[in-house]
Image (spheres, coloured by chain):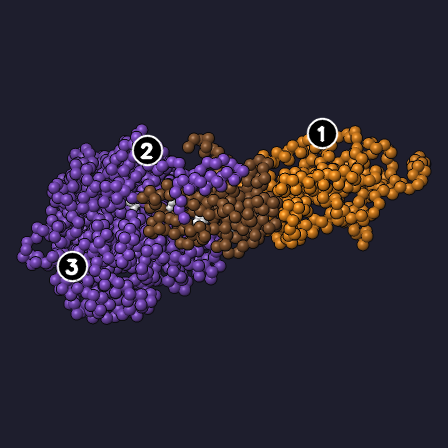
Chain colours: A purple, B brown, C orange
Amino acid sequence: MGVTRREFIKTTAAAAAAASIGTTLLPGGVKPLFAENDMEWHKSVCRFCGVGCGVLIGVKNGKVAAIRGDKFNTINKGHLCVKGFYLHKIIYAKTRLTHPMIKKNGKFEKVSWDEALNFVAKKFNEIRKAHGPDALAFYGSGQAETEETYMANKLFKGCIGTNNMEGNPRLCMASAVGGYLTSFGLDEPAGTYEDIEQAEMFMLIGTNTAEAHPIVFERIVRHKMKNPNVKILIIDPRKTPTDQVADLHLFPKPGWDLAILHAMARIIIKEGYADEQFIKDNVVFKDNKKNLTYEQYKQFLEKFTPEYASKVSGVPVEDIVKAARMFGQAKTAMSMWTMGINQRTRGVWANNLITNLHLLTGKIGKPGCDSFSLTGQPNACGGVREGGGLCHLLPAHRVVKNPKHREEVAKVWGVPVSNIQPKPGKHTVAMFEALNKGEIKGIYIMCTNPAQSLPNASKYWKGLKEQFVVVAESFFPTATTKFADVVLPAAFWAEKEGVYGCTERRSQYMPKVLEPMGEARWDAFILRDLGIRMGFKKEFEKYKTAEDIWNEYISLTKGRDLDLSGATYRRLKKERGLRWPVPSEDHPGTYKRYVKGDPIFDELSEEKKKGRWIYFYGKPEGKAVVWARPDKGPEEPTDEEFPFALSTGRVLEHWHTLTMTGTVPELNRAVPKAYVEINPEDAKALGIANKDQVIVETRRGQLKIEARVINRPKKGTLFIPWHWEEWMANILTIDAFDPGSKEPEYKVCAARIRKA
Amino acid sequence: MSWFEKFLNKVADYRQPLRPPGAINEKDFLQHCIRCRRCVEICPYQSIKVVKSGLGKKSGTPVIIPRQVPCYLCMKCPPECPTDALQPIVQKEQVRMGVAKINQDTCLPYMGIICRACYERCPIYTEAIILKDEIYPVVVEEKCVGCGICENVCPNEEPSIVVIKRES
Amino acid sequence: MGLKKSKMLSLLFRKRRLIQIGSLIFLIVIPLLNLLNLEVVTGNYYSLRIWKIEFVDPLFALQHLLLTLKFNWQLLMGISIPLLIAFLGGKLFCSFICPYNLLAEWLQKILPAKKTNVFKVNAKRYWAVLIGWIILTVIAGFPILYFVSMPGQIGVFLGDLIFLKVMGVESLMILAVLGIDVVFLKRIWCRELCPVGALLQRFHWNYGLKINYNEIDCVCSTDEIDSPCVQRCPVYLNPKSDPLYPACFNCGECVKECYYYGEALKIKFIKDITNFEPNFKQRKEEQTINKEEA
Ligand code: SF4
Ligand code: SF4
Ligand code: SF4
Ligand code: SF4
Ligand code: SF4
């Protein structure tokens, strides 16, 4: 049982008095966590996950000394997770990169900014001249600020003239983008976090919310504690920490859950849980080739009996039926998913099938109802999805294919429209493949660590080794800087201002409270100066402040679905973020899209709406699509040779490739090293004991790692947290990708395991 | 905390020493244990340290300092002991080395910071530490074996959960 | 058979130093093996396990018994081999295994070689010493002899240093005893005070391995100090005197020395340690005559 401080001191003191060795110093209890009164607090946003928690940065004597949750932020209401709590330690990490370096004769040498930038500009221009613009590429990040991605976009797509401009959200959110676009016609969820407190039922599928999106999980948990009737359905092959709140947990074989979702749809329709009026008014049906009628869709579903789904997925029939009824009976339902759905060769389809359930039951557009994709990175939504940081996109949900879009953007950028190619560039896997082949000869990598985070990572080291690689990073060394020819020190969070856009369409401002460490500079200005040195003086010299860039960007969002024109710096500095659309400075932002209150819906003419309360304006006639997608298993199913299905994922205490959280001793203490989780039954059969060294092997590589025998993964599955460079899980993962979203199937591959 | 206090904390543990699993009560332990270190050497994780503070009664006795290395309950040490200072136990659930106490004044979840490090890594998983309201960790003293893993992983600067010897 | 046995014995005693050094190295190897988690041996000379065979220092078994008043089968098993050796050979442990003795003997080598006095053995004193240690243990209420058991202390010093990388003040005990004992007190520690030896010697069989002096063969001076065997004895005894036990720890150095002289000293299983012939003087004279004749 817990004890209060007084009792605690009593117990420890009594024990200590009895001890004849040592002194009676007590741990804790003495030093309050937030006592520093003489601190200056600045409102900002957490650097880590896509939840987008508001933080207060405590500055004392010119140093960031503490972080606390922002009580007035509606996302986290003052709470944080332990990563966010230690953010201040990361600023002062020993591994901070403080000066530019060029690799000369295999060794990094300190150089001046001038030398570094001139060198990069010269190299890039040479490559561009000799091999064309498409021999250059940019690889960015969902952690870069919107302003930074915007500058990169302009430099590469607008000035250099290549669409080889990608970002790591390709590896995490692309399938969700594909899912939303195909189902609703527009990217990003209709609802917001506010729906959590109004939902009666949650379907958490392919997400370990408790560890990957801790604050969202906390909100769900608090809501359930207050309202015990709230039901939580989890569909996940692993018994994650999220499982602790489950009312029902389905454990499908990794990669075989599509049939379950279809079977649930079939039961929902069969047992009368479908909202027929909603379907009639707001939904059309399609399969991969053509439009269907409702009847044809029902026909299609006939195949997906619970028995069939059970056979395919390994989930008991009753559980599937129970799950469907749970979804159907609840008045309001929210589904949430993340990488377990997105990182799949049928990620887009899986996204569609989740949304299907909402469209069939009409559980969308109402408070407490949404199909809500959780983002992994803090600015994957804001910077890359909205900012257009992928090879087929342009800022503000525009696409390169659309000539009108190209024209609009070229005009604002002040470049000839012919500069922007109409053909999408190379998506992430193709980009690194091209680097291997030598088709791309120079790449600029910003704020990300692909040498560790790409699937089947070791395959792509060849290209990184051979081609000209520039890495702009706040930390050194990382797995990627090893391969760099030039490393540029980037200012870290709190040393720069800018905007992050989180999962719920909320854009939030982050202030600069510190001067960058050493010679580090803001990424956007590095790109600006590089642009100028490459000969785009006119295009770049106008950007003097972050606000200049932001203002230009929001002017591009005017009239688009993500209208941010009301979200000026002036406003963002005061408010705890704004959820688009915010068409004007006096607009409060939008709680729900496609319904009353959404300025775009409100503007629609009555004859268009025909009295409908919801209108999916991204699709013709405002009708969302229910997709009849075939079910398909993973790219690499298990077989005799590789009998285990391997998944990778996160732990609460760490984030991505450890460049940040790995520098905090407290977090390393909590999880010091990687391990492979294996079911006790499997472990027994293979003679593996807890903490034994084992070798996990896939067709792509092998990894020596510590075993953690625990009843979490299902029999026949393995799980490895992927954060550590030393135990690089991505040596094992497969680089097959979704043909639609081009997102790789990190989450399922076939493996075997033996004692080392 | 001054450097001097830190130094003191380093050289001397502040509590009754935690003994390896299976240890009999402290008074008898001091008589039974012949200070042979066989338990120390058999431990695969170097969990067991030796009291090295002069010529006192406890000098040379095995001790576990969880913040350095906790006991991972492999149960190799009890049968290694040549005396009955460590009673042979086979089931890790039967171990009663100590009991964990949470300091609610500093434990992160009680401060609104999500942390489940101790809960997640407790070897008596979901039994010895439970989450009140699925958020606040609480130790179930009857189940806690006192292995100290929770104290070891607690990501607070000073551990908010410490294992204290059971009085028996 | 008899011949074979005596050959083996003499081989054993000739290789004594090697065995001593081996024993010290063993103490270093144990923690190293355990660092590799090999688990084949653990412990030191308080208690040792080699594969599945257990050894326990009888002194610690005794302390355990005194303090807990409980028999412990594991301990009993552990002391059986040490006791068997003590039964046959007295303090063979001290002369062959104990690392303290090795260090002391080495230190003696550096110091001035010539001895100026030897000690008379007083058997009653040994009982007093042992009983004194026992009373101390009981009063202390914990195995306090842990601090003064030199073989164990050296073992745990090495073990803790290698395995845990720590040192403690109690290890200074080794230096203190070593210095004072060897430099000022002429090895009184091993000869009389050490509780380990004091206990082991109690189990020495009447017919066990002992130094045997045959006066007739002796060719050296009758002077107490001047004989080579006396000069050689590490613990300042006169091998030609009686009684020699419980002080002598059967290192056999005197025997080895005598080999080059009269071979009057032997180590064998025998009840009486000296073999006085009545016509000692006469034999001596005969020998001188023989020598002159030659
Ligand atoms: S939940 Fe995410 S955004 Fe919130 S504090 Fe933790 S890492 Fe930061
Ligand atoms: S049970 Fe295992 S881990 Fe724990 S102290 Fe004993 S030997 Fe070490
Ligand atoms: S093995 Fe037993 S006797 Fe030896 S030190 Fe450990 S507890 Fe004491
Ligand atoms: S609560 Fe702590 S000490 Fe108790 S069993 Fe769990 S981890 Fe071990
Ligand atoms: S690990 Fe420490 S801070 Fe975290 S919940 Fe446990 S006691 Fe609290």
Q: Residue at x 14, y 44 (%)?
A: A588
Is ligand 1 within 8 Å of the beta carbon of the residue shown at mark 3? no
**Distance Cα–Cα, label 1 vs label 2:** 63 Å
Which labelled disc corresponds to residue A452? none
**Distance Cα–Cα, label 2 vs label 3:** 53 Å
In the rendered view, tell whether residue A424 sits above or below residue A682.
above
Tell me the SS state at disc 2.
Answer: loop
In the rendered view, tell whether residue B7 sits above or below residue B143.
above
Q: Quadrant of residue C73?
A: bottom right
Residue A275 falls left or right of residue A233: left
The crowd level at tag 3 (other Cα within 10 Å; few <14, some 14-19, many 20+) is many
Tell me the SS state at disc 3.
Answer: strand
Mark 1, mark 2: which one is toward the viewer? Answer: 2
Q: Give the residue number, with chain letter if any, for mark 3.
A: A624
Q: Residue at x 16, y 59 (%)?
A: A624
Label 2 sits on what residue type? Glu
Residue C214, image x, y percentages: 86, 42
Mark 1, mark 3: which one is toward the viewer? Answer: 1
> Looking at the image, which is closer to me, A219 or A504?
A219
Residue C106, image x, y percentages: 69, 35
Label 3 sits on what residue type? Ala
Residue A577, image x, y percentages: 20, 42
**Distance Cα–Cα, label 1 vs label 3:** 101 Å
Q: Give the residue number, with chain letter if any, for mark 2.
A: A36
Residue B148, image x, y percentages: 46, 46
Q: Chain of mark 2?
A: A
Q: Give the residue number, with chain letter if any, for mark 1.
A: C184
